[in-house]
Image (cartoon, grey):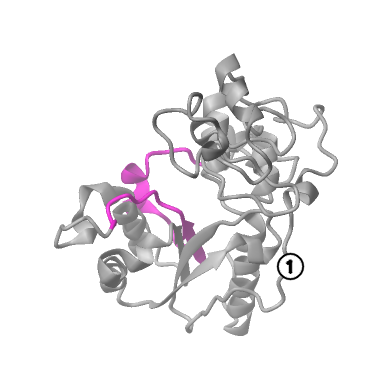
Amino acid sequence: MKLMKNLGSHILHEDISKVSNNIPHATVLIGGSPCQGFSNSNRVSNYFDNPKNLLVREYIKAVKSSQPYIFVLENVPQIISAGKGKFLEEIKNELYDYEITSTILNAVHFGVAQERRRAVIIGSKIGKINIFNPIKRFTNTVKNAFKGLTNKIANQLDYSKSKDIVKRRMSYIPMGGNVFDIPDQLRPRSTHSNSYVRLDLNRPSVTIVNPRKSVILHPTEDRIISVRECARLQGIDDDFIFYGNLAEKQQQVCNSIPLPMFRYIAKIIKKHINQYNVALR
């Protein structure tokens, strides 16, 4: 329902396990399935059959049903290295009729003001497709990403309100600092270096995860960054509005993909399709 408000009523919001065997033919099929079952500590003999990888299996079913000329699977970098490459090999075995390539891209190389590494697996029936990080790179900054933000822009006032003790902790953290800048007597008991991170205006952001759970801080204000600020750091335009309660909005934006990086991928795929004179549909 939330996507329909931005993209139109043609959007189908459904459990993929109920539709993966009935996906019509498409020129390109794109998926970004959550996948937790491929850590190096996981000792199962078959990663593809691991219940934790259910949604990846459903995406593979969708590819088999649709038989697109090209498919794209986006995920965390570990999907490529899991089990010393075993998980990726199992995907290739399932989709043996595709030429499959894989790479790890960093959103910061595409002008996104965020360090965000993502694995991209591409399969093609119309010739091999290679995706690389761009040769010409420029580094965007949090300052540039936040330029022009006002409270009138949708989702800018959507941020978690913190208790007084949390605000006290925030006050000790400089730009680029983290939880270990908080005095011992105030520091939370359960800590890791990725929590209470204050963004640096002059650098790209750290990887955007749920800003409330990790307590990602505004560069100059003692507060958690807003949903719109997260969206800016993902390269998402201001006219894309996030709906739902605050927790849902925060989860939506941290699950989003860095748009400039995937526009780059889309352009390469479109060029490849045109070279093979395949009709887009």
Give the residues in magenta.
12-39
Closer to us: 173 or 141: 173
Q: Report the residue at 62% width, 22% height from top.
A: 167
Name the residue furthest front.
184
| Above/below status of 48 relative to 177 | below
The picture places residue 224, in percent across and down from the top left corner, at 62, 30
* Residue 54 in view (yes/no): yes
**Coordinates of residue 251 in the picture (x, y in percent):** 51, 35
Residue 22 is covered by the magenta coloring:
yes
Dominant secondary-structure state across the stretch colored magenta: loop
- Work out whether 87 lies above or below 229: below
Q: Amino acid at mark 1?
A: Phe
Q: Is residue 92 magenta?
A: no
The residue beneath circle 1 is 138
Looking at the rendered structure, the number of numbered marks drawn on it comes to 1
71 displayed left or right of 109: left
Quadrant of the image for the N terminus? Answer: top right
The vertical placement of 43 against 214, above or below, is below
Which quadrant is home to the C terminus?
Answer: bottom right
Name the residue at the right extreme: 148
Q: Residue at x 64, y 77 (%)?
A: 271
